[in-house]
Image: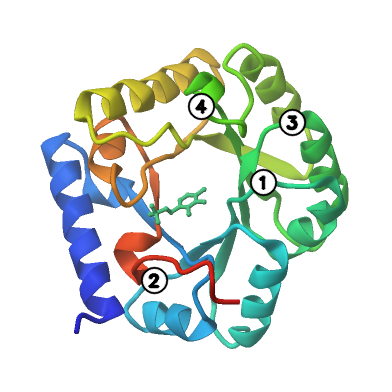
Amino acid sequence: MSTIADSIALVRSRIHAAAKAAGRDENSVQLLAVSKTKPAQALRQAYAAGLRDFGENYLQEALSKQLELRDLPLSWHFIGPIQSNKTRAIAEHFAWVHSVDRLKIAQRLSEQRPAELPPLNICIQVNVSGEASKSGCTPADLPALATAINALPRLKLRGLMAIPEPTDERAEQDAAFAAVQQLQASLGLPLDTLSMGMSHDLESAIAQGATWVRIGTALFGARDYSQP
Ligand SMILES: *Cc1c(COP(=O)(O)O)cnc(C)c1O
């Protein structure tokens, strides 16, 4: 049976190979372990095997794991849809938010970020797949949103996040991720982060400039939503 450490080694070798193929430094791509639905014990094993950054989609689940794992120096990333009544807890308990797609949410996160914590790192989620996806701002709305978020005092706008429509066609993957990279470049802001690429398409994302790949299944195995 393969362990989480084996899976991490495999994912790291995929990242390494993809970076090399793209002529990029492998250290320019960071691994975010997406741990939604997985028990705290699995995160503890991933920590023991060297991972520090964990991405969660559901606030209550994330907060209970944070409590169980409070003895570990982990960095927590919120990557799921955000309702306005959840912003305070997100502002207080995470280092990064990858899934901001409207100004109202960003304003609340900025107002509610505790003064003693560093600014909250933000990626704007952009929808490059049109009607196939309901999350993310439209490319047309992105420039104004990015400018407004960049001006908020307690946030640090780092870049863009995208979840393109899943496809096994490498050319389609490349086109979607390239669109995200071009949108980012067109903003003319000093951004250093592209959060894109999941278990099935990290190679394409890295070829198109990803700096965070968000990996769940390839690290922890398939998710079973029938389990509480
Ligand atoms: C679940 C999830 C992932 C991980 O997807 P895998 O295909 O399991 O690697 C990445 N990003 C977001 C936003 C997710 O919700």
Mark earlier in primary sequence (4, 3): 3
Name the residue type under label 4: Ala
Q: Residues within 10 Å of mark 2 (few under 14, many from 20)?
A: some
Instruction: Check disc 1 and report its element: helix, strand or loop.
Output: loop
Name the residue type under label 3: Arg
Q: Tell me if the residue at label 2 has its CB under 8 Å from ligand 1.
A: no
Write down the residue under mark 4.
132
Front residue (pair 35, 130):
130
Q: Residues within 10 Å of mark 4 (few under 14, many from 20)?
A: few
Residue 137: give x, y in percent of width and height. Answer: 64, 25
Mark earlier in primary sequence (1, 2): 2
Question: CA gap, disc 1 to disc 3?
Answer: 11 Å
Kindly indicate whether the residue at mark 2 contacts the one at mark 4 (C-beta within 8 angstroms).
no
Farthest front residue in view = 226
Residue 81 numbered tag? 1
Residue 126: give x, y in percent of width and height. Answer: 56, 28
Left or right side of 48 for 145: right
